[in-house]
Image: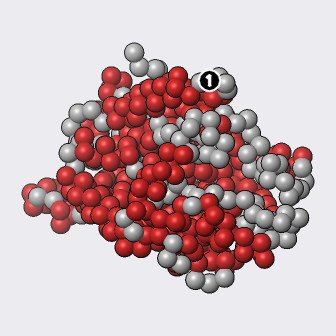
């Protein structure tokens, strides 16, 4: 039984768009060129011309009766509230970005480069340096990582005498991709990495503005940067913003019928393979063979890159590192901070045994991924307005269902959620849940680390600079959003046929 349709005016006030607007569907407007007279049948074009001529003749005739007064909106308060809400949201995101700039600077000024700021990047750097030196599969050995990590102490200004690190569970081709950033001195390499990531964020903002133009160029950019997954990913030196571009362009390509290109973009997710799993199953299930071909081509290119640079033995060593970090309670993996079922199960039962815990986590994870796929039951129709909402459900399911999925991975959702926001499919409660999942953590970080702690920077890495929220909160927020999204688009709700009902409007 479907939930009753509710007004989305509250959420419209947040981002300048209501959930059930009668305006043209934004996802259709972005990816389809406007029809012109040249596209019409000659008879229709002639009739259309005659109607325009007649209408112009009427408009030129003097009006009968007294001149009409100024036209007023039937609901001026709603338009005003939407503009006010949009302005408040943009103000919030601009303020959040300013806070992040201050946060980055205070950590850098405290001498915490490569200890707190850019910590993950420093581990990628060490592996890439080992690869450059010809270590091959040895780049997954702790002693090799330490030998290339400790020289970074020269850029660290804190009290520690050594930097902690461990082999990263990333495929050999990821280290090869990182090699160009190891050619200059490490701080410059990290600055270049940040520059590339910020350029990727600008591309995401460009897509967001296409789908939600009410935000404007500045509002779209700050909306992207203000989300904790993006800001935290930039701080740690993660590649998630680059992968977010891959997911966004994969969606745009599928929507435009460019399946081969979509598959190539999908293969980019093999830099962090856990993100590619569900999308790969999706294109196989829907028999998008060109997309499958593109993904295979990209995957072969990455595999060849890894084999040539690190040697075939590196693949077995990579699998071994993953196995070593796959324990349910593995402290290095940080499972309690994740945004998946693993974090939720450990929050509910911290002392749960390994085998029953894994059984529960994998059962829930597989069920979630199957639920994400289920919304695409029926014929393939990327032109349907509900396609964006369904793709968003799939994307969130990929993150919640992944065994290793930290909150910064939610950056991958930027474009799918923006596209879904522009369509009428999601109800008001769903939009509120999505907004909360994206920005509640921002409020918490600003309040605790900014207002309460005054941007203090501790050299003790056990004192968090970002993860000051309850550990399980990101997982719960995205799980709630996923449930509401799924309920809005599952076929039994009838919303999958929105595209068919809107056919007359498009014609």
Residue 437: x and y in percent read: 61, 40
Q: Residue furthest bottom?
A: 184
Residue at position x 34%, y 43% in the image: 387
Residue 269: x and y in percent read: 42, 57
Q: Nearer the viewer, residue 428 or 65?
A: 428
Q: As drawn, is 333 to the left or to the right of 263? A: right
Tell me if residue 454 comes above or below residue 156 in the rendering.
above
Q: Residues within 10 Å of mark 1 (few under 14, many from 20)?
A: some
Residue holding disc 1: 352
Q: As drawn, is 117 to the left or to the right of 328? A: right
Residue at position x 57%, y 74% in the image: 129
Residue at position x 65%, y 47% in the image: 332
Quadrant for the N terminus in the image: top left
Q: Tell how many labels.
A: 1
Residue 163: x and y in percent read: 75, 63
Q: As drawn, is 340 to the left or to the right of 362? A: right
Q: From where the camera sits, is residue 115 visible?
A: yes
Q: Nearer the viewer, residue 502 or 148?
A: 148
**Colour convention of the picture:** secondary structure
Give the structural element (helix, strand or loop) at label 1.
loop
Residue 367: x and y in percent read: 41, 27
Tell me if residue 129 comes above or below residue 124 in the rendering.
below
Q: From where the camera sits, is residue 181 visible?
A: no
Q: Nearer the viewer, residue 405 or 437?
A: 405
Q: Quadrant of residue 144?
A: bottom right
Q: Nearer the viewer, residue 126 or 505?
A: 126
Tell me if residue 221 comes above or below residue 76 in the rendering.
below
Q: Quadrant of residue 36?
A: bottom left
Residue at position x 41%, y 31% in the image: 366
Q: Residue furthest top?
A: 1
């Amino acid at each position: 039984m479907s939930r009753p349709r509710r007004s989305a005016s509250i959420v419209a006030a947040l981002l300048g768009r209501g959930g059930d607007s009668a305006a043209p569907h934004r996802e259709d407007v972005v990816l389809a060129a406007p029809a012109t007279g040249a596209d019409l049948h000659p008879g229709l074009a002639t009739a259309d011309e005659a109607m325009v001529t007649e209408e112009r003749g009427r408009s030129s005739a003097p009006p009968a009766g007294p001149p009409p007064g100024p036209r007023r909106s039937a609901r001026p308060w709603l338009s005003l509230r939407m503009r006010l809400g949009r302005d408040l949201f943009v103000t919030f995101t601009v303020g959040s970005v300013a806070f992040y700039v201050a946060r980055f600077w205070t950590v850098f000024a405290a001498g915490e480069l490569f200890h707190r700021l850019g910590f993950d990047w420093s581990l990628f750097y060490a592996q890439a340096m080992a690869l450059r030196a010809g270590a091959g599969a040895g780049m997954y050995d702790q002693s090799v990582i330490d030998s290339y990590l400790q020289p970074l102490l020269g850029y660290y200004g804190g009290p520690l005498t050594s930097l902690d690190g461990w082999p990263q569970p990333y495929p050999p081709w990821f280290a090869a991709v990182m090699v160009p950033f190891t050619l200059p001195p490490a701080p410059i390499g990290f600055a270049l990495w940040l520059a590339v990531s910020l350029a990727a964020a600008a591309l995401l903002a460009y897509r967001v503005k296409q789908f939600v133009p009410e935000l404007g160029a500045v509002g779209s950019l700050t909306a992207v940067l203000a989300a904790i997954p993006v800001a935290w990913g930039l701080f740690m030196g993660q590649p998630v913003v680059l992968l977010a571009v891959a997911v966004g362009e994969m969606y745009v390509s599928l929507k435009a019928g460019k399946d081969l290109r979509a598959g190539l973009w999908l293969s980019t997710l093999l830099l962090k393979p856990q993100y590619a799993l569900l999308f790969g199953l999706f294109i196989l299930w829907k028999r998008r063979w060109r997309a499958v071909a593109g993904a295979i081509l990209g995957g072969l290119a990455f595999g060849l890159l890894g084999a040539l640079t690190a040697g075939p033995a590196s693949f077995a060593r990579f699998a071994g590192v993953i196995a070593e970090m796959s324990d349910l309670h593995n402290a290095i993996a940080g499972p309690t901070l994740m945004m998946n079922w693993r974090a939720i199960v450990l929050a509910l039962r911290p002392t749960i045994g390994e085998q029953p815990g894994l059984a529960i986590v994998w059962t829930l994870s597989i069920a979630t991924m199957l639920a994400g796929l289920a919304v695409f039951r029926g014929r393939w129709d990327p032109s349907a307005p509900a396609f964006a909402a369904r793709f968003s459900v799939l994307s969130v399911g990929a993150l919640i269902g992944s065994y290793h999925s930290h909150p910064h991975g939610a950056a991958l959702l930027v474009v799918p959620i923006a596209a879904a926001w522009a369509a009428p499919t999601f109800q008001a409660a769903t939009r509120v849940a999505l907004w909360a999942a994206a920005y509640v953590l921002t409020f918490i970080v600003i309040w605790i680390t900014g207002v309460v702690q005054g941007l203090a920077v501790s050299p003790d890495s056990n004192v968090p600079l970002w993860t000051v929220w309850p550990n399980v909160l990101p997982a719960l927020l995205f799980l709630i959003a996923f449930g509401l999204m799924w309920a809005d688009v599952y076929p039994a709700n009838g919303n999958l046929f929105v595209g068919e009902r809107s056919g007359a409007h498009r014609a």
